[in-house]
Amino acid sequence: MRVRFPPGMQRQFVECTKNRSGLTWKEFRRRLKIGTHVAYRYEVCSLPLRVFKKAMQLSQMSSRQARKFQYRIERERLETIIDVRKDKMTSELVGICLGDGHLSPYIMMVFGDKSDDTTYLLDHVLPIIKKTIGMTPRLNTNRPSENFLVVYSKQAAEALHRIGLPYGDKIANRARIPEWILERRSFIISCLRGLFDTDGCIYGFKRKPPLRGSKAIVSYEFGEGSLLANNIYVALRRLGYSPRMMPHRNECRLAVNKDIARFMNDIKPANAKHHRNFQRWYGPVV
């Protein structure tokens, strides 16, 4: 069962119950048993009846007081089972989700910086999601520094979970590149593109005298405890690159000029910011 509100009312309900409870947002979410990425406050999706009742309980809000939010209770809509094909496009979507995505049993999100990633989300990620799972995600712009695409569908989330994406916290749940991707070269390339576009970067520095010019680095860096840097090291080795692991930063990087030029030519990042940074930093010794 789901609880649905008129536009704007769900946010008011969530904020009102949180304030009445006297809890911090972190403790309020913990008591409701919802993750930090679940955006009920931003009206990305309706409230499960369980969450609605628990919020009323924590805030000591009566049914009469809750009626001012004009809610209604509906049965969940039945959806057909979604069968996601294991192909290059799905491999790229897996990489995108492993990078800046979030999956829960009812929702899939892909996040991006407002200034750098919005065009990439709309022009590249949205069509991939639409073609892969047959649903058009919604762009949410309510957060101050980031936008995100969101699909609310239990069946879509289950389909992506079945092919290897974990629910919830990616570090705690040991997220990794699925084996079926590592078995085929074209799938590896697509997955690395998705991961690089969302969670990778090209940075550089000026060479020290007597050398002149700039030096580019292709980098995949993750939080402490993530398995993805080691996964990417294995994937790049299978493609014939010479990656280096930087354990103190949990970073996998390419630092050899020929590897970096080949990476840009073979992986073909879809996020324009990487091409700008490549042009800025890549260059021969002069």
Image (spheres, rainbow, N blue to C red):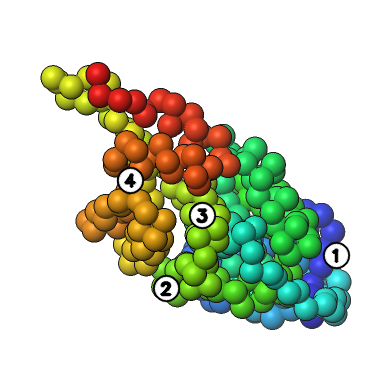
- Disc on the earlier residue, 3 or 2: 2
Q: Which residue is mark 4?
A: 254
Q: Which residue is mark 1?
A: 70
Near-viewer residue (6 or 191):
191
Asked whether residue 267 is in view, the answer is: yes
Q: Secondary structure at mark 2?
A: loop
In three-dimensional space, the C-alpha distance between marks 4 and 1, rounded to whole angstroms, equals 56 Å
Q: Nearer the viewer, mark 2 or mark 1?
A: 2
Q: Amino acid at mark 3?
A: Ile
Q: Amino acid at mark 4?
A: Leu
The image's mark for residue 174 is: 2
With 75 as the anchor, is 146 left or right in this view? left
Near-viewer residue (200 or 57):
200
Residue at image position (53%, 72%) is 180
Q: Nearer the viewer, mark 4 or mark 1?
A: 4
- Disc on the earlier residue, 4 or 3: 3
Tag 2 and tag 4, C-beta contact below 8 Å:
no
Q: Which image quadrant is residue 232 in?
A: bottom left
Q: Which residue is mark 3?
A: 189
